[in-house]
Image (spheres, helix red, strand yellow):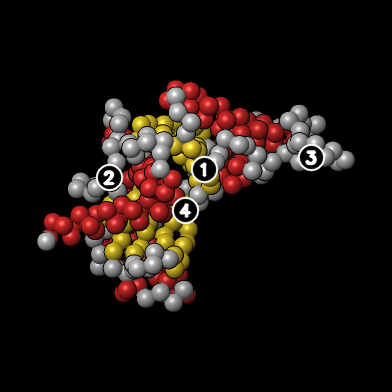
Amino acid sequence: MLLVIDCGNTNTVFAVYEDQSGAALGVWRTATAPGRTADEYAVWLIQLLALNEIDRKQIGSIVLATVVPATLFNLKTLCRKHFRIDPVVVGAPGVELGLEVRLDRPEEVGADRLVNAIAAHKIYGGPLIVVDFGTATTFDVVESDGGYAGGIIAPGINLSLDALYMAAAQLPKIAIQPPEKRLGDNSTMPVIGKNTRQAMHSGIFWGYVSMIEGLVARIRAETGSPMTVIGTGGLAALFSDWTSAIDVVDDDLTLAGLRYVHQMNALSNEKRTV
């Protein structure tokens, strides 16, 4: 079995897959905490494995990606101490990704963005744009041959909401949701709010829809290509229902990309030992 670890700025995802079928046996999330020790991870994860009747001794390999450098040591210690496995770490020397990073400073690109690009091109071909609704909202451009061409980083919607609430004393804290239709109005959801909450919902929701549509259009114009747009991350489905700019929603894109990285490096290691 394969253990996949995806450590993001907000959440860390652990998933276990069967080797042969590739079926997911369990997927679990915990809040990312740089100070969490390997032993604390182990207590939490081993209990979840047991609850799902997964024998941790059957886990034979681990692939790991993190965008929070402070978590790397403890996650690697978790793998080595509690699973007796040296993990494949995205971005580590000698780890193959199978794509060319066409940037001025390739080392600056987040592991999650590269992994998303790998999976998107493997599954959907290219050229394409990956829009990831995470702590930041990122737009990543993948060329027809799978090369990573660069992208855009914008504040995530939760960051924007928190900043608005914290900076403006009279504004309430609101949930992320589409603006509600007014009573008796069966038309498209209104943009103009009739009270503070409606105005905030409209600004956040339609503002992000407009950002998605505008940036996708600008990327397409700059590249001169009708690119497929893949949405991923927790809020992708919410926005995809209200814009035609997103062609496909794939919530498991990052995990799929990590599995591809593991397969690629496992094959590479087999070739070196033959």
Nearer mark to the viewer, of 2 and 3: 2
Residue where numbered disc 3 is placed: 181
Q: Earlier in the sequence, mark 2 or mark 3?
A: 2
Nearer mark to the viewer, of 3 and 1: 1
Q: Quadrant of residue 41?
A: bottom left
Q: Earlier in the sequence, mark 3 or mark 4?
A: 3
Give percent across and percent down for residue 162.
Answer: 58, 38
Residue where numbered disc 2 is placed: 98
Residue at 69% from the left image edge and 37% from the top image edge: 201
Q: Earlier in the sequence, mark 2 or mark 1?
A: 2
Give percent across and percent down for residue 42.
Answer: 37, 66
- Crowding at label 3, few (<14), some or many (≥20) Cα neighbours within 10 Å? some
Label 1 SS: strand
- Crowding at label 2, few (<14), some or many (≥20) Cα neighbours within 10 Å? few
Label 4 SS: loop
- Spatial CA span between label 3 and label 1: 25 Å
Q: Which mark is residue 159?
A: none
Give percent across and percent down for residue 211.
Answer: 57, 29
From the viewer's side, name the closer residue of 47 and 246. Answer: 246
Quadrant of the snapshot with the N terminus: bottom left
Residue where numbered disc 4 is placed: 252
- Spatial CA span between label 4 and label 1: 10 Å
Give yes or no for contact between labels 2 and 3 (Cβ–Cβ under 8 Å).
no
Residue where numbered disc 1 is placed: 231
Q: Earlier in the sequence, mark 4 or mark 2?
A: 2
Q: Quadrant of residue 171?
A: top right
Label 2 SS: loop
- Spatial CA span between label 3 and label 4: 32 Å
The amino acid type, in three-letter code, at marker 1 is Gly
Q: Is residue 77 left or right of residue 237?
A: left
Residue at 30% from the left image edge and 56% from the top image edge: 262
